[in-house]
Amino acid sequence: MGDVFIDVAIIIIIASLFAIFLRSIRQPLILAYIATGIILGPISIIKLHDVESLRSFAQVGITLMLFMVGLELKLDDFRSIGPTAILAGLGQVLITFLAGFYLATLLGFSAIVSSYIAIALTFSSTIMIVKLLSDKKDLTSLYGKISISILLIQDFAAVIILMGLSAFSKSTKIDPIYILIVIGKGCLFIAWIYLISKTILPWIIRIAAKSTETLFLFSLAWVFGVVGIISSPLFGFSIEMGGFLAGLSLASFPHNFQIMGKIRPLRDFFITIFFVLLGFESSFKNLEVILIPAIIFSIFVILLKPYILSFILGGLGFRKRTSFFSGISIGQVSEFSLTILFFGNKLGHISVEVISLIIIVSIISFGISSSLIQNTNIVYKFLESFFIIPQWKEHVVEKYDDLGELKNHIVLIGGHQMGGTILRSLEKNGEQIIVVDFDPNIINSLKQKNITHLLGDILDIDVQEKVQLKTARLVISTINDMDDNIALIKKMNKENRRAKIIVVAYESEEARELYEAGADYVVMPHLSGGMHLAKIINGDNLDKVEKFKSQDFMNLG
């Protein structure tokens, strides 16, 4: 038992050092885990003592990861993302798989190995994309919503593949009777899970939710109980399938976010060991053989896969900029890809060398893709003239209405939170306002209130022309993207110097940079909030707290 603790200590210490370094250069942490495994495995700087016990830990990590995926995968999400996004997601998965399969066969891989490689190349990293888009505050943007929708469909497809592999883990023959038995068992188990989730689970969770510790303990009991039943000889499915279905059965409950918050640290610990073992069990003995295919597959993932999605989105009626931004976000390999390859290796379908090949692809694609996503505006500006996709003359999805002739108007960029407060104040003064936002939900809200609006990104030239920046007298940007605000200031200084431009910053250094770029005024929320509070509590105003409270409450909308 002492050997296991020593091994875990070695893994965590080395992984944390790598993680600190990669975090400082804004790279995904999964690279730290794989690098740790490579040091402990192929390079063998330090020896591990009890690899079998670590494999059990890794299995727990996969189970908890799929449990979390199930918790987040609500069927209602498919209704909300719309038919065009679903069509784009399914098209991307199918076309990327076929293109990847063809490329792998051209490089001399067998049909079964080519299938695994194509699957690995098709899926993208949900964890990485959500984190990067969240850091950029782009999760609610149109392209952000499209990207998340594509990931949702990819995750669903990946789970189906894992279920299929699980079904045939006990047999290598394609027997029609066996297939029917497997399908029957699967339907029976899903029906049982559904029945439990509608009858007994609500009652148990209502009691367990009174204590966060009890809810956490019950969640673990539920996932491991479901896994134990589904992997028993009666059903014979994999523990991965059990983990996913256990999560899916809890996804519709309002406590699923509480459960995710408690389970996430535990999952992160065990999944770290899983990715370390992937690196540990990689084989780079024939590096000269797999290096060229790895580079070719990396180019496919970073360039061709994003272009496939952009091409589909353009054909469905999205604008070039939206299509490009959505496409570039999926240019990496998924954690699911490595999980599926791990499963395929256990079944004897692929060798360790194939896993090593995709690990190299993942390292290359993670590094380059994260940089591209962080600098999407710069990349798009550089490639815009070379980027050709099908475009509708009248866009089906992003169709801009004619706003008529505007003069001496106010352009408000961002209609949520601060933007909403500004909008209400300007409306009271009878100003002519047009609101630009890339969140479809905010646009729908503005539409219901009959407020002049435009769905889009203010850096899009078409949007700039539609809102007629050249004749505006005031431009207010409530977005906190530094690059976007500086680009907007430069645009206004070049084409409409008489207009005043007000922007937002959250750091003093950013505010100075925006002033130096030419902003007329920079709003700093924490500074303005502090000054407002100081005004309330200063002197006699303390007696008027109720008055300020009533005013603020009314402004909440």
Image: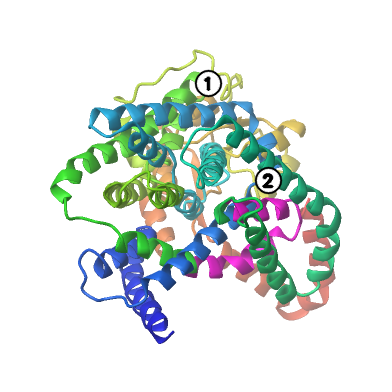
Q: Is residue 284 above or below residue 325?
A: below
| Nearer to the camera, 541 or 208 | 208
Q: How many marks?
A: 2
Asked if residue 249 is among those painted magenta in the image, a careful observer would answer: yes
| Nearer to the camera, 193 or 142 | 193
- Left-right relation of 210 to 159: right
User: Percent from the top left, x then y, of residue 312?
Assistant: 46, 24
Q: Is residue 175 above or below residue 507?
A: above
Q: Earlier in the sequence, mark 1 or mark 2?
A: 2
Q: Quadrant of the N terminus?
A: bottom left
Read off the residue under disc 1. Answer: 316
The stretch of residues the image draws in magenta is 241-269
Residue pictured at 44% horizontal, 50% vertical: 343
Q: Is residue 177 above or below residue 517?
A: above
Q: Element type at marker 2? A: loop
Q: Is residue 132 above or below residue 208?
A: above
1 or 2: mark nearer the eye: 2
- Left-right relation of 186 to 473: right
Residue positioned most to the top: 393
Graded by Cα atoms within 10 Å as few (under 14), some (14 to 19) or many (20 or more), the crowding at tag 1 reads many
Residue pictured at 48% horizontal, 70% vertical: 269
Q: Element type at marker 1? A: helix
Task: Name the kind of residue labelled 2 in the image.
Answer: Lys
Task: Determine the main secondary structure of the stretch shown in magenta.
Answer: helix
Task: Name the kind of residue labelled 1 in the image.
Answer: Leu
Read off the residue under disc 2. Answer: 74
Asked if residue 163 is among those painted magenta in the image, a careful observer would answer: no
| Nearer to the camera, 208 or 197 | 197
Residue 471 makes an appearance in the image: no
